[in-house]
Amino acid sequence: MPATQSVSVCGIDDAGRGSMLGPLVIAGVSVRRSKLKRLASIGVRDSKKLTPASRERLYHEILSIADGHYIARIPPRSIDASVRRHGLNDLEARYMALVASKLDSDVSYVDSCDVNPRRFGKKISQMSGNRTIRSYHHADSRFAVVSAASILAKVERDKSIKRLKRRHDLGSGYPADPASVRFVTAYYAKNRSMPSFVRKSWRPILRITG
């Protein structure tokens, strides 16, 4: 067994799961256990509790502390294919397993999207060559390394949306955002189709397209 302080710890989280458009981003951050207090000391916490400016600042500080990181982007077409097979959780598990494999830490903590976090963690472990996975609900609030991953995922997801906004007035992309609903409704009314960056399997989209 490695010495406690030299153990490599990975945090994995997603951003954009509930959005109607754009990628679902999975991010991983790996650090030696001895650095975990440094992550907490710079103000790392669940990305949803931070302002965009704070996330941007912390993004760069996290990268300066981390021993490794990995970003995976799942495009809408892959999301749609999985939703039609009722396999969105499996898709996310597969990408989290990819991140865990790439970073190859001694233990990986993941934020579970499954109602059964133990089952979700076991699935990721099997998909990643039986790596040690610890899966929890609200892991992004419980573990600084998962909070760090949530910040990277959110910043990368926001970058993707900003690129789309250069050509389209589409809001945040979430169903609760009136600007996003107006965009997809108007786009479909004009073109009788949806652009490639829209998740066509999402219920709010299906209500528009019939």
Image (tube, grey):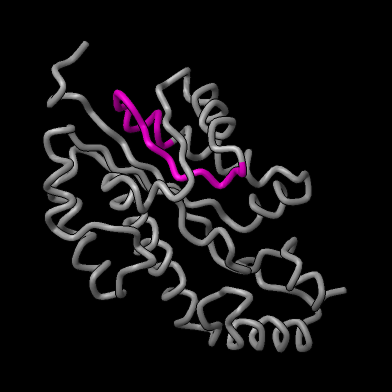
- Farthest residue to the right: give it: 210
Q: In this view, does 186 lie above or below 24?
A: below
Residue 55 point in image, percent of width and height: 27, 67
Residue 36 point in image, percent of width and height: 17, 41
Quadrant of the rendered image containing residue 116:
top right
Quick one: quadrant of the N terminus? Answer: top left
Quadrant of the rendered image containing residue 150:
bottom left
Using residue 106 as the reference point, say whether residue 119 is left or right of it.
Answer: right
Using residue 54 as the reference point, say whether residue 207 is left or right of it.
Answer: right
From which residue to which does the magenta span run?
99-115
Residue 32 point in image, percent of width and height: 17, 32
Q: Is residue 54 above or below residue 76?
A: below
Question: Residue, x 45% and y 82% (percent of image)?
Answer: 166
Question: Residue, x 47% and y 18% (percent of image)?
Answer: 130
Does 103 lie within the magenta span?
yes
Does 25 lie within the magenta span?
no
Please state which of residues 164 and 33 is positioned toward the viewer in this rendering.
33
Question: Residue, x 12% and y 54% (percent of image)?
Answer: 41
Question: Residue, x 42% and y 31% (percent of image)?
Answer: 134
Using residue 55 as the reference point, say whether residue 40 is left or right of it.
Answer: left
Residue 114 point in image, percent of width and height: 60, 43
Q: In this view, does 156 lie above or below 92?
A: below
Quick one: quadrant of the C terminus? Answer: bottom right
- The mark total stands at 0
